[in-house]
Image (spheres, helix red, strand yellow):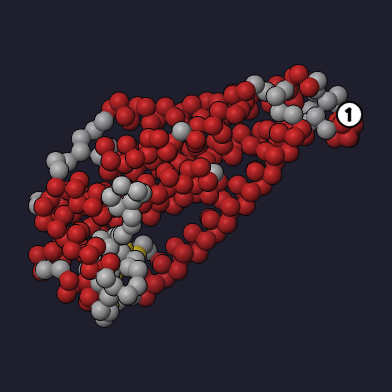
Amino acid sequence: MRLAVYLPLLLPLLTPLGVRLLAERCEPRLGTWLLSLCALVLGAASTLSLGLLALAGLVRVPWLAALGHWAPPAPRDDPAAVPVSLAAGLLLGGATLMAVRFLLRRARTLAAAALDAACMPAHDGLVVVDDEAPDAFALPGLPGRVVVSTGMLHTLEPAEHRILLAHERAHLTSHHYAFVAAAQLGAAANPLLRPLARAVTYTIERWADESAAASTGDRRQVARAVGKAALAARHADRTPRGALGFLGRGGKGTPGPVPRRVAALLAPPRGPRPLLTAVTLAVPAAALLAAGEAALDLHRLLESLGIR
């Protein structure tokens, strides 16, 4: 095996450099697709590379070679020395455990959400709960539900209720939970990809904001509704589950997600970014090509040893 096997492990180190640029400069729908794809592909490619490194080290263990009646390769034939392969095997076990754990938790969460949605009496997919805390969220299911508290309805003006519903329904119709799950799955397999997963939770909100702006035709009014809901939720006694109440803080000197969303709504809509899209797609493509080349190298090595 050649050094290409390490490329999928190194590429995630570079992703934080372009995450903010992609989330802020790219059209939200396209940005969500690109970020989710990168997280999922890089997570899978890095996991595959760990598996290849671990397997390449196994064939170098003398007692395994004696058991399989093959001669272990010379040390110079493979950069995957036994200590490196042992570390790769441990990391592979951790990545697999975290990914399976995430999938099980997400499956239980979605099943519970679908059951809750099916049991909620709704009018045109809308459920109003008697709760003074301002909250609004989309509950995926078959069909999904938009849940809004009376506190949120009292916070917003009647004209802004339409914005709220358009925002939350965009989460359901565009299946935003699937994009978040894909990005978080990649981050579960490779913690270096967590910035990508966090960026997806921001871009789906921007996507829903733009859907609400397109539905109402008034970007400034949508920005005002987002700001009002966020301020009301900030003073609530508990953290809201809703998208319009999506709060967060930026790093030092960096505005949080809500001010950035408001600023984006007050600016002209983002257009397509062909160069940025091409550069972004080149990263997962390079990871897949490198992992594929490493797999072919391992296949040749196993064939040379007579292992089928």
Q: Nearer the viewer, residue 140 or 161?
A: 161
Q: Is residue 214 above or below residue 225?
A: above
Q: Residue at x 12, y 50 (%)?
A: 219
Find residue 25 and report its image quarter.
top left
- The quadrant of the rendering that contains the C terminus is top right
Left or right: 298 as drawn, with respect to 189: right
Q: Give the residue number, with chain letter if any, for mark 1.
A: 69
Left or right: 63 as drawn, with respect to 47: right
Q: Where does the image place residue 303, in percent across and percent down from the top left?
A: 75, 23
Q: Residue at x 34, y 43 (%)?
A: 32
Q: Is residue 113 above or below residue 30?
A: below
Q: Regarding mark 1 in the picture, which secondary structure is present there?
A: loop
Left or right: 2 as drawn, with respect to 221: right
Report the amino acid beneath label 1. Answer: His
Q: Nearer the viewer, residue 24 or 252?
A: 252
Quick one: label 1, few (<14), some, or many (20+) residues within 10 Å? few
Q: Where does the image place residue 137, in percent across and percent down from the top left?
A: 30, 65
Residue extending furthest front?
252
Q: Residue at x 35, y 27 (%)?
A: 278
Q: How many marks?
A: 1
Residue extending furthest bottom?
130
Find residue 271 and report its image quarter.
top left
Q: Residue at x 67, y 23 (%)?
A: 1
Find residue 4 and report its image quarter.
top right
Left or right: 14 as drawn, with respect to 244: right
Q: Is residue 250 above or below residue 52?
A: below
* Observer able to see residue 217: yes
Q: Where does the image place residue 11, in percent across and percent down from the top left?
A: 50, 32
* Observer able to see residue 186: no
Q: Where does the image place residue 132, in percent across and percent down from the top left?
A: 25, 79
